Amino acid sequence: MSTPLMKQYASVKAKYPDTVLLFRMGDFYETFEEDAKVTSRVLGIVLTKRGNGTSGETPLAG
């Protein structure tokens, strides 16, 4: 989690660990990590990954 976005996500998630966080990305909202897995399962949307093909990829749904 080295990008500014993922650092912000980690900071906010630490304050609200029992909440699904929605991050606005332009005209869309995205969820990350475990929130993405929950969002994908509950809403029936695609679970994908954010990253560059390395082991540091982050689950993403939005």
Image (cartoon, rainbow, N blue to C red):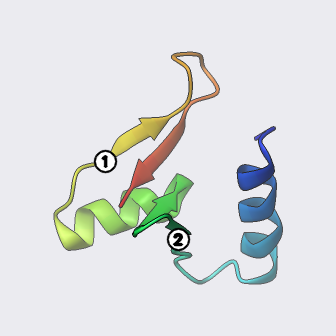
Residue 19 percent across, percent down from the top left: 58, 83
Of the 4 image quadrants, the one containing the C terminus is bottom left
Q: Quadrant of residue 58?
A: top right
Residue corresponding to mark 1: 47
Q: Which mark is residue 17?
A: none
Type of residue at label 1? Leu
Residue 17 percent across, percent down from the top left: 69, 77
- The residue nearer to you, when weighing 16 against 6, is 6
Q: How many marks?
A: 2
Instruction: Using residue 27 as the reference point, say whether residue 34 is left or right of it.
Output: right
Image height check: is 58 above or below 41?
above
Residue 23 percent across, percent down from the top left: 56, 70
> Callout 2: few (<14), some (14-19), or many (20+) C-alpha neighbours within 10 Å?
few
Q: Are marks 2 and 1 in contact (CB under 8 Å)?
A: no
For the point 76% across and 41% down, the residue is 1
Separation of disc 2 and disc 1 at Cα? 17 Å
Residue furthest front as drawn: 26
Of label 2 and label 1, which has the lower sequence position? 2
Q: Which mark is residue 24?
A: 2
Type of residue at label 2? Arg
Residue furthest left as drawn: 44
Instruction: Using residue 12 as the reference point, say whether residue 33 is left or right of it.
Output: left
Foreground label between 2 and 1:
2
Image height check: is 3 above or below 41?
above
For the point 71% across and 63% down, the residue is 9
For the point 81% across and 81% down, the residue is 15
Instruction: Using residue 6 as the reference point, say whether residue 51 is left or right of it.
Output: left
